[in-house]
Image (tube, rainbow, N blue to C red):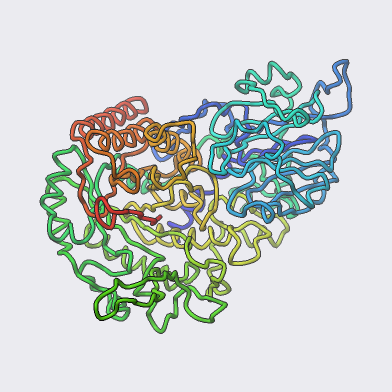
Amino acid sequence: MKKQTILISGVMGVLLGTLGVVYSTSFISSNGKGDFNAGATRPEVLTPSPEGGTPVPSEKPGESPSATLVSQHQPASSSSGLQDSPPTDPPEVLVYPSRTRLYRSSDSGTTWESLDPLSEINTSTYLTAAAVNPRNSRHIIIGTSFEGFYESTDDGKTWSLLNDRGGLNTFYQGAGFYNEAAAILFHPETPNTLLIREGYSNTWYEYSMDRAAITWMGTSQDLSSRVPAIQGGYLRPLDLPRDASSPRSRRLLPLYPQNWPIPPAANQEAAQTKQLDEDFWRRREQASDKRGIYLNPWQAENNLEEHLDFVEDHGMNSIIVDFKDDQGNLTYDSQLEIIDEVDSQWIRFDVEELIQKAHERGIYVIARVVVFKDKQLYRYKNHSYALWDHTKNAPWGVWRQETPAASEENPEPESKWVQIEYWVDPYADFVHQYNIAIARELQELGVDEIQFDYIRFPSDGLTRNIRSRYYEQRDSQSRPQGYEEQQAAGLVVHPELLARAGWPEPGAASEDDIPHRVEALSSFLRKAREALTIPIGTDVFGFNAWARMGYLGQDIEAISFYVDVISPMAYPSHYARDFLPEQTYFERAETLYDEGTIRARTITGDRALIRPYIQAFLIGGELRYEYPEYTEYLNLQIRGTINGGGSGFSLWNNSGRYYMVDKETYLKAAEQDNGSRSTEQEQNSQQAADSPDSRMGG
């Protein structure tokens, strides 16, 4: 219970430091990303303070990272027609985008209406900004994490795509995706004109809805000089009530009245520090700067020495090995009784020998454990833990029609349906505990890190037919200390603060809602964190780390509170070719890892190390590449990772044939990693190699 308390306090401390509160008649930004001081696109890595135990954030002392930019549109009180000082009372109309819900108040925040615009847009995207037109309070604009912009002219009852008006091509990234809108304001002087800050940068644009024209406005400092009405003097934190009579509440979290959707402003201490225990720093040190290769069980069994030589010769220091594979088979000699019951053991290598040989060379052993894609557990006890197909009242799966090759005996074979994927229920506690028991055994055997894969819901097949038989019995998630008492008093920890760590926001009503899927995955990782002392990590889809989202339940912001490492699979071949179309294929490969790593670090606040998977295989049209093209292709991904501030990288080739590797590049990468690490400390005292290797883990 002690670990859990430490974890929750650490989570909430960071959350409070991330979310600021301000108000205006037209705009309130979510995510704490609409701030004037948020100019850095490459976040600094968290490092312990001289006192130890508390990381120092990248903000300068005295600057609150949670200050949120707003404009004030009050009745004219000066010759300029703009108010000279902040109002003393909240304005009448307020809107607040809270990730998956939009809140609107027409009585200065006394009561709030919860709106659900994402049900008409895309439930995987998040709301990131919103503004009310000061000249027509029924007119609302919202910005999203990757779906662009929408507007409503009827108080949020219906929504239409603002992108269709044109002029917003600056935000368009291709393949139907837009860059994040980090902040939106209505221009205080020009009607029907928006001021928009682009996500992951400090760049502002002016957008005329009448002319469908967009104009670059520069940084926040440039904007404030061009439009004086929105200078920092128009920031005003909301004073939210506290339960001063409760000594327990004073040492917990800021409180809010139950009908208030906006998170309370963080105190300075919470904003500038991250309360974490020594175990966090020990694990972070252990997992940092790991560069390695993936080995399938066959390679680990038959060519281990050869691959360990390869790792050493190329300046790398880690291997990732399947200890529980994509079919749910344990590839080592497990002593757990449940493994015999499930019949999930297929011994492929001597685990003690593998770990000993790697450690003798100073090579870090990462145990890959596939979690929710599990054919063996799927079949256990007559499919007791399988995801369910409610249309057939039978276990759900992914099926494919296959036709056998013709033969003399059967010249015209009939096609048949074959099940190719087997998924267990992410809401089932038994599934959680089964995988955690395996991870604990591996920890005892001496592996250095657990890497959980397939931490997600299925992406293929008839996913609309999926139902969980464990959703209603899922864990009532452990809440911060004193939560029930505060709730009974009508004063509770703000739900958005909890949502950022994986708890669903109000309004998420069914198992299909993204917040509950995020909750299911976060619940598993939270239990794993409490049970294990070695570093843990997880793989995610590349795009889930490129933009804020909850697609398939993978929200890396929530995940980052419970894992030490996140490994985005940003394989260039897996992106639509018209994504970032202005770049060449090779240029885009570097961008996906450079900017992608920066984005992942920004979304997670550097709580977890970002260690991307590198595409060390060729697929599709890439198969025409020859040396030195394919080596350059690989090296660009590595260079992007290093430039983006990644903490090492992992090469993925399903067959273990790493012919694309250039030795000089890897030795140089090792030097750069070690050099940057020393500087930081000083300053802070293919199913086959060339066949389609369409790994869709994560």
Q: Residue at x 77, y 51 (%)?
A: 158
Vertical order, 437 against 679 (above or below): below
Q: Is residue 48 visible?
A: no
Q: Is residue 95 above or below residue 328?
A: above
Query: How many discs appear?
Result: 0
Q: Of residues 618 and 600, which is closer to you in this image?
A: 618
As drawn, which residue projects farthest toward the bottom? 382
Q: Nearer the viewer, residue 676 or 239?
A: 676
Q: Quadrant of the N terminus?
A: bottom left
Residue 191, percent from left and from top: 82, 28
Is residue 454 visible in the rendered image? The answer is: yes
Front residue (pair 612, 391): 391
Which residue lies at the image location 48% right of the left edge and 60% below the top edge?
459
Res 344 quadrant in image: bottom left
Left or right, 315 with reference to 567: left
- Residue 475 image offset from top left, x and y in percent: 53, 69
Up-down relation of residue 1 to residue 249 (above or below): below
Q: Residue at x 56, y 50 (%)?
A: 500
x%, y% of residue 677? 30, 31
Quadrant occupied by the C terminus: bottom left
Judged left or right of residue 284, residue 20 is right
For residue 607, what is the image quadrant? Answer: top left
Residue drawn 73% across the image and 58% down it: 490
Locate residue 27, reporting x and y percent. Answer: 74, 36
